[in-house]
Image (tube, rainbow, N blue to C red):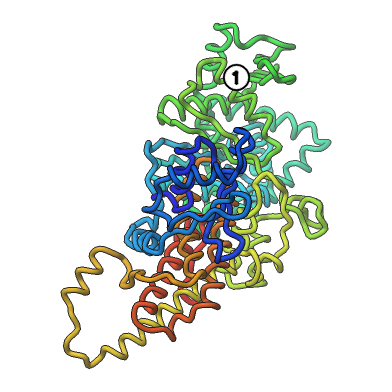
Amino acid sequence: MPSIPASLSQRIEALVGIDPELRPATKPQFGHYQSNVALRLAKAEGRPPRDVATDIVARLNIDDICEPIEIAGPGFLNLRIRRDVLAGAVNDQLASPTHGIEQAAQAKRVVIDYSSPNVAKQMHVGHLRTTIIGDCFTRVLGALGDTIIRQNHIGDWGRQFGMLIEQILFEQLDLDTLDLPGAEQLYMRAQRHLEGDETFQAAARERVVLLQGGDEDTLAIWRRLIAISTAGFNETYARLGVLLTDDDLAGESSYNDALAGICDDLESRGIAVHDNGALVVFVPGFDAPAILRNSAGGYGYDVTDIAALLRRVRDMHADRLVYVTDARQSHHFQVLFALCRMAGYLPETVSAEHIGYGMVLGADGTPFKTREGTAVHLDDLLEEAEQMAAPEIALAAIKYADLSNQLQKDYVFDAKRMTATHGDTGPYLQYAHARVCQILRRAADASDASTSGATCTDETTDTAKSSQTNSPYLVSTVAEPAEQTLALELSKFGDVVAEVAQALTPHKLCAYLFALASSFSSFYEQCPVLKSEGEVLTSRLALCQATGDVLATGLGLLGISAPERM
Ligand code: ARG
């Protein structure tokens, strides 16, 4: 269901032909919304604004939504939503299994490429963001009815495996004892070993050839390294509470067989050319070419992504491709998309979006690094936040901090600020939700107490009611401005989720939930709930119920839990 302000706006625009630009009224006595549309039209038409306003009011047929429109001052339109409309909207939302989220008119098949860490390296602070953001996209688009195909494009192929495997053989390492942190140590030892030891360098190179040639013993070790790494990734995913599973793994190595064919295709059609021994594509509009095959005959990141895109378009039948990586890879993806459009691999009917996010900064405002200067491990960050709060709250803090700013911006990882229970934080929203639950629990206890012993509860009516709605309460009156503001805020939920799904802007969902929690706070301050009676009590409880539903659902879309007690 479109929100009340959205339908109001559409109806006025249909009559006057321009956006009425509704603004919330500055004072309750002016109604709920104000529009200066008459003033803007009057200017364009060279007529007195109040005449234009009078005209609009006479021709506008919206008394099914609004009270009679007032013309104020030079020609402002003051709009007041009818109380029964406000009450009805909340009741519809209470009855809706999705709490007002509408299914997309045309469900899409969306491939979301996210997380995508590298084998034999622990996930670092950069992978935190892609994992949290991609997971949120999965949840939001899934809620609209899209089919989501998650792709974890792990870095499981490349020259580094030569030195890793040689180092394992050199140390006669027992792979049964190796875990992901251990594999990362191994990586560093291999790198040090490589420096200055030419015999080892040659052995590592030879090992890459064996790996690419499909040598079974080499492949066996390589597979073990992948298993060790994915086990480590899965521990982190479980800790983060994200949806990725082993079924979503589609590592770089899974494209090996397709690479030569892609090179041939592009070369035979004159799209790829030889340049200093390498096979490359010059894409109009970009300075640096995409490298399909280097002069040593090796395939790299660019051509692997072409193969991945082709699989997603041709085999998975995707309508929408989404890639979540840090903003520094933006150029890579712009070249990839342009190249694939040019080659006919990416039809115009399929959209491709790279969502590049900013960096995580330390308290000093510089990129988050360890004392040794390496990127901070994701697990260390989780631990830091968990020193401030229980795991469920710490996680809410991290996810919300990550999602509540425009993704492209850098953000400061400040465990203290983000775990605060006041202000624009994840824990604040969890508390707001828990508080709503507490009110509803108290109300239920009170009504149990008053009806216990009563013999004449009307069972039939009760059941009839609960089959229509998830809530035992319905709104019948919203006389107070704070009740009305809350009802209007609630009605926007579906529109906000639809917008976030379209533009992939989770910060707008965060801002909405924060505004909703604030409206709820004002309502709760101004309108006693448990101390009221009769239909006022029931109506207010219904508003509480709807707020709780929307907060829990909204937090769920961000990947944040909404405990009932805190
Ligand atoms: N493994 C890469 C990294 O850690 C990210 C891969 C992103 N996905 C892709 N299809 N290129 O930076």
Residue 32 visible somewhere in the drawing: yes
Examine the rendered structure and indicate whether residue 91 appears above or below residue 271: below
Q: Is residue 400 left or right of residue 203?
A: left
Tag 1's secondary structure? helix
Is disc 1 surrounded by few (<14), some (14 to 19) or many (20+) residues within 10 Å? Answer: many
Q: Is residue 358 left or right of residue 93?
A: right
Examine the rendered structure and indicate whether residue 532 appears above or below residue 288: below
Three-letter amino acid code of the residue under disc 1? Leu
Q: Give coordinates of residue 154: x percent, y percent.
A: 56, 40
Q: Is residue 44 left or right of residue 286?
A: left
> Residue beneath label 1, please?
339
Residue 229 visible somewhere in the drawing: no
Mark 1 C-beta to ligand 1 under 8 Å: no
Front residue of this view, candidates 424 and 160: 424
Q: Quadrant of ligand 1?
A: top right
Q: Give coordinates of residue 238: x percent, y percent.
A: 51, 58
Q: Give coordinates of residue 321: x percent, y percent.
A: 51, 33
Residue drawn at x 65%, y 15% is 281
